[in-house]
Amino acid sequence: MHTKLELYQKVAPLAQLGIWERNLVTGEIFWNPVMREIYEVDEDYVPSDDKSLSYYHDKEGLSQLFCRCRETGEAGSGDFQITTERGNVKWIHIIVQSSFEGDKKGYLYGILQDITVKKETLDSLQHQEERFHQAFDNAPIGMALVSLNGHWLKVNKSLCNIVGYDAADLLKIDFQTITHPDDLDLDLMQMQQLMNGETNSYTMEKRYFHKNGHIIWVLLAVSLVRNDVGVPQYFVSQIKNITERKQQAEILIRERQRLDNIIKSTGVGTWEWHIDTNNMIFNAKAGRIIGYELDELGPDFYQSWQSLRKPEDQEENERQLNICFTRQSKFYACEYRMKHKSGKWMWIESRGKVVEWSAEGQPLLMFGTIADINERKLADQERRRTLEIISAQNSRLLNFAHIVSHNLRSHTGNIQMLLDLMIEEDDDKEKDKIINMLVVNAANLQQTLTHLNEIVKVQENGQQNKKSLNLHNEVVRTLEILSESLRNVDADVAIDINVGITVNYNAAYLESILLNLISNSIKYRQHDRQLKISIAASYISGNLVLEISDNGLGLDMKMYGHKLFGMYKTFHGNSDARGIGLFMVKNQVEAMGGKITANSKPGAGTTFKVEII
């Protein structure tokens, strides 16, 4: 081998260069140690033509390279992929040179370098560049490469759509040509700051002139690309069309201004709800409506407001919000009760509108108002109660008229018939019988008139003679009046009434109500078991309710419920039943502004509930 290889053999390992030589006459091949490292063979490996060629994927290409070099005498090179002795795939760069001496002996020699890392790096960069161009060209927002003097170098389709220009037309002009004059100076100033290294990027809202002449609002983000030594090369711009958003913002500003004017004139509270974060903002008036200053409600206004809303009203509030959020209605409106700082429940009305939606159609931002409607609601409740009373009174009046018409007609009809018989009768004994019958009918008529008169008195005198009565004491006194009757039937009476409860009531009516209801428990008891009577009082929705229950006969409410409080209505066939007691109780309760209800089941007993206003 040539002695000139000695120098190469010293420096080759430093440069990681494989050195080889092939004697074209003898076929002898020389490899330096780097060659063996590249091919991953042992130190004692003896290379041959066939074995060396077997490592290459493109054997034909390598053979052609060698042939050209032998035929032309010129150096050649190429990049080839090999599979090493250990099965690893590598890229190598080979340089070939031929040499012929006077005796026609020839050699092929050259260098070989492992370029696998370099090749993979270049491939990765190429893929990245391809991905960049793919992303650039198909980006949903406008993208552009811009020269340092403002000319468009490359633009994508989205940008062309935004400004209305074809790519070819856009590349003929600079961005300054289509920028609104009022926005140009700020844009140029920030570009200069980028080139000076004062900032890495900038973002701004600006206006472009569309090719058709109208204004387009965009959000512009700009960064600068520099070469390896830091010299600016070009700008990368991202442009998003925000015209619709800006228009919506202008509408929002106008609506907010209009709302502010309304608020000032009506004195209502206002709220702003960022729905995705549940962040709520109230004005001072909103807090004062329920008796609080804003700092008293704490930092989490949403949670504070939720905690003060009456739980029973939460479902209706959620329902109304859902109607608005699903766009069944443009507006949200709900009336609900809030706990005032004083501890009282008060009615408020909340109204609102969603002013910002996400791309998926979800509500993001909502504005609204809060108004104190407590007086109006109380007036409405009182009006409804008055209407109910009037309706009940009309019903009673109609019933009363029917009773008067029916009962008096029956009595007078009987008397008229008996008088006719007496006129025609000649027998004195028969006349005496008729007279006795007239006496009985007259007595019945008197009793009916007495009952009707009592009903009239109830309606006339209901609100008169009211006084403060201790409910527990009145119940005990009534039980003392009925003590003998209760003792005779071995009744077990339980009282669950707070001794401090007092009522403003007509004493005679309260006694009559208690006597009638407790007497009914005795009269309509089950004879095969001990009578149990429970008398309790509790507050329900702010009203006092007296409850009297027993385990007596009970009755079928589906069949008799609508007749239970009717006049002269009896249900169990008792000989002493007159059907007037419950009718009187109902009239007395309603005359005092309350109401009475019953729940009963055959064999299980009856429960009466009297609302005391």
Image (cartoon, rainbow, N blue to C red):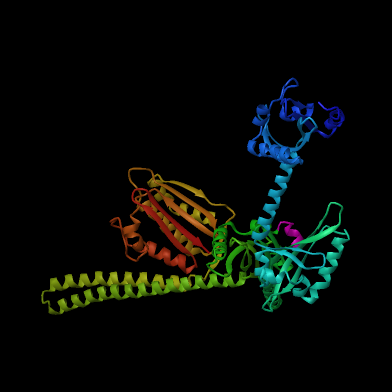
The answer to whether any part of residue 347 appears in the image is yes
Which corner quadrant of the image does residue 296 belong to?
bottom right
Q: Is residue 185 magenta?
A: no
Q: Is residue 600 left or right of residue 226?
A: left
Q: Is residue 597 above or below residue 3?
A: below
Return the residue nearer the eye: 430 or 475: 475
Q: Is residue 469 left or right of residue 160?
A: left
Q: Is residue 175 left or right of residue 379?
A: right
Segment tinted magenta in the rendering: 293-300
Which corner quadrant of the image does residue 58 belong to?
top right
Which corner quadrant of the image does residue 581 belong to?
bottom left
The picture places residue 135, in percent across and down from the top left corner, at 67, 56
The picture places residue 30, in percent across and down from the top left corner, at 76, 26
Residue sticking out furthest to the top: 44
The answer to whether any part of residue 293 appears in the image is no
Q: Is residue 572 left or right of residue 320?
A: left
Residue sticking out furthest to the front: 103
Q: Is residue 292 above or below residue 68?
A: below
The picture places residue 353, in percent across and down from the top left corner, at 62, 69
